[in-house]
Every structure is written in C-alpha cells, then in structure tokens.
Image: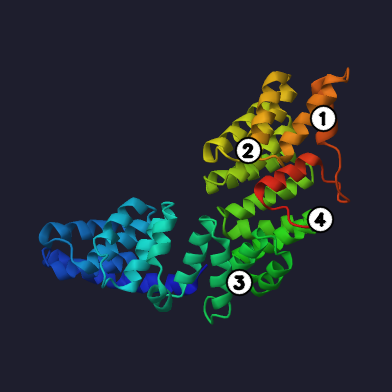
Amino acid sequence: MNTNLDHRAAQASEKLARLLSYLDSDPNNVALLGDAAECAFDAQQLALCDQLLDRQQKLAGVPPKSANLRGLCAMASGRFDEALNAFAALINDEADPAVRYNYAYANAMLGRFAEAVALLDNEVIAALPQGITLKMRTLHHLGRLEEVIALGRLYADHPHEGAEISGLLGTALFDSNDIEGARHYVERAATTADGLTMRGLLALNDGDADDALALFARVLETHPTHSRAHLGKGLALLDQQQFNEAARQIDAAAQSFKTHAGSWVAAGWAYLLSGDLAQARARFESAGFVDRNFAEVPGALAIVAFKEGNLDEARSLAKAALRLDSACLSAALARSLLAAHDGDQHSASKIVETVLNRPVDSQGNTIAQALARKAARIEGSR
C-alpha cells in the first residue's frame, strides 16, 4: 500500500466535496468545473472526473489544461485511444515536455513505439526522468538494443531513476548475450521488477530453476502482468518438466507480448512436450502470423507434422525452414527424424519422443527445452 498516495487521495476527496457543494449553487461555473475535475482525478474518482469535464466542455469548449486532464483520466482508465486523441490536440513545437511525455506514453501503450521514441527528445528526458525508462522500453520493443544500452549507460547513475534504468540496461545486455554485463547492472536494480526478473533469468541461465521460480513469484505477486516474468517462469517450469503449467505461463507471456514470435514458439514447445499437438500447432502458427520469416516456425511445425504421422508435410515444412535459415535447429532436427524414420521400423511417434527428450547438457535439459529457450531468446551461456 502506498500511504502517501492514499493520504493525497483522501485530502483531494475532502476538497472535492467542498467544490461539489459550490457547484450545486453555481453549476455553470467553468473554472470551478475544471478545479473539481482535477480534484476528482487526484481522488481517483475517474468516472466523476470525466463527467465534470463533459459538463465543462458543453459550456466552454476544452481549455488546454482540461484536454491534458482528459488524457490523463483516459490513460488511468486504460482508454489509450481516447488519451491519444486528447494529447494530440495539444502537441505543437512549443508543447510542454510533460504533455509530450504523456503523448509518448499513450503511443507506447498502443504499440506505436516508433512514434513514442520520436517524442522522447532530450528536452523531455531532462524535464521528466521517467522519460528515460520509457524511451529505453520503446527502443527495446523496436529491437534497437544498442541504443537501449547506450542510453542506459549514460543515465545508469541517475539519482532518481538509476535503479529502474539499471534493470532495463541489464535486460538489454542479457538479450545481447552479454551475461556478465547484465549481472553487473542487475545487482544495482535488485529490488525493481525488472531487476528481480533478470535475477531470475540469470539464475535460470545458471541452471538453478528453483531460485529462478522464487524470484519470478516475487515479481508476479506485485506485477501480475509482467510479461518477461511469466515467460521466465514458464521456461523454469519447462526445466522442471512441469509442461502443462509451463505452457500456461508462456502462453500468458505471449498474449501480453503479442508480437514476440519467440514466445509463441516457446509456448508451442511446452504444449508439444505435454502431448497436446493441437495446441502446439496453434501456437507455432500464431508465431507465423507475427513473423513469416522466422525459420523456427516451419521447423517446429515440421516436428508436429512428423509426430502426427504426416511425413510429406513434415518434409515440406523442414525444407521451407531451411530456405529461411540454413542453420535452423528445429528443421535440422526434423530432417534427422525423417531420415531415422525412413530406415527404422519404429513409429514416427516413438522416434520423436526419444530424440526430443534426450538430455543435451549437465542440467538434464532436453533438445526440446533448448529449442524453446532459443526461440524465446532466454538461453544465454551455461
């Protein structure tokens, strides 16, 4: 519980009650409506804030201060399209940095990451330090890891945002396979959600699934929609061969990421290992909708087709995957399975079970688990 926020909300509620009593006597007072709407927002009475702004708009249009408040109220209610429209009306060459930050945030929440990055210039970052972390997150979504790392290193010692910045920097370094660099910065962000998540991923990277699960649980207790924590938890459960729950967790991450093809592929491997071919195929196909050029998609689908006994489809899919990437691991595995089947009397299902569940490292991880980590980009070095 944030006692400071609760105290401010209580104070705002008391002031709001007074303003509403004044409005009973003077219902068409435009300035009073604006003040009351601002108080309602501070008191976390968002529906009332909207109603007061509507009354003000009918009387006198929308002054800039009210347009900004309309956008903030919409964002707080999760209505980011409305927020975008409200802030857009205020954007010009002389727009206040706070308004530009709010506009960037609304863009980011709608997946308009390039638009958000363009708004987060040096002036915005200087005025609002949280603009640094927002820019790092949006750059990461765009896959511009070098820029994330450069920005993070520039501001890692920031007096107010340093811990959050270090967590995001550690994440970018991890995704760039700089494991030791990630460790350094994660130590400086140990209690943030991103820092705890990265500690979990580093524990998983070191083969300690139990510690990883404990860290992911701490994150999800306070941030239940944290995508990377769900993904990490799913991969840790995959290590422990809890395939059904692993699939559920990785599914949650994929749904949250939406456009991270690797998460859908990792979920597909979890379902495949649990024996649910229909769900595995659906997740691999979802990855294909996100990225048609991701070779691991047809490669993984080739494994599903092989396991279903559709050998011609498996051959075609493996060939397509290798055209996209001659080093595609799942396609190479599919071709090996097909070759083994052609010269073996065992059923296709028996061969695939034997190969997919064969340990490939000292921790006992199987080929399938390794492929899931590879797709999710959370494999790292052991």
Q: Quadrant of the C terminus?
A: bottom right
Question: Looking at the picture, which amino acid does disc 1 mark?
Answer: Glu
Element at badge 1?
helix
Residue where numbered disc 4 is placed: 207
Residue drawn where x is 12% and y is 63% of the image: 27
Q: Quadrant of residue 323?
A: top right
Q: CA distance from mark 3 to mark 1?
A: 42 Å
Question: Looking at the picture, which amino acid does disc 3 mark?
Answer: Ser
Element at badge 3?
helix
Residue drawn where x is 83% and y is 36% of the image: 357
Q: Nearer the viewer, mark 2 or mark 4?
A: 2
Pointer 3 and pointer 1: residues touching (CB < 8 Å)? no
Element at badge 2?
helix
The reply to whether residue 3 is visible in this rendering is yes
Sequence-first tag of 1 and 4:
4
Residue neighbourhood size for the residue with mark 2, other residues' Cα within 10 Å, grouped as few (<14), some (14–19), many (≥20): some
Residue where numbered disc 1 is placed: 353
Residue 59's mark?
none
Residue where numbered disc 2 is placed: 324
Residue 166's mark?
3
Sequence-first tag of 2 and 4:
4
Q: Nearer the viewer, residue 308 or 236?
A: 308
Residue neighbourhood size for the residue with mark 4, other residues' Cα within 10 Å, grouped as few (<14), some (14–19), many (≥20): some
Sequence-first tag of 3 and 1:
3
Q: Is residue 30 left or right of residue 347?
A: left
Q: Position of residue 23 (x, y in %)?
A: 16, 66
Q: CA distance from mark 2 to mark 4?
A: 31 Å
Element at badge 4?
loop
Q: Position of residue 83 (x, y in %)?
A: 32, 56
Pointer 1 and pointer 4: residues touching (CB < 8 Å)? no
Q: Tell me if residue 263 comes above or below residue 200 in the rendering.
A: above
Residue neighbourhood size for the residue with mark 3, other residues' Cα within 10 Å, grouped as few (<14), some (14–19), many (≥20): many
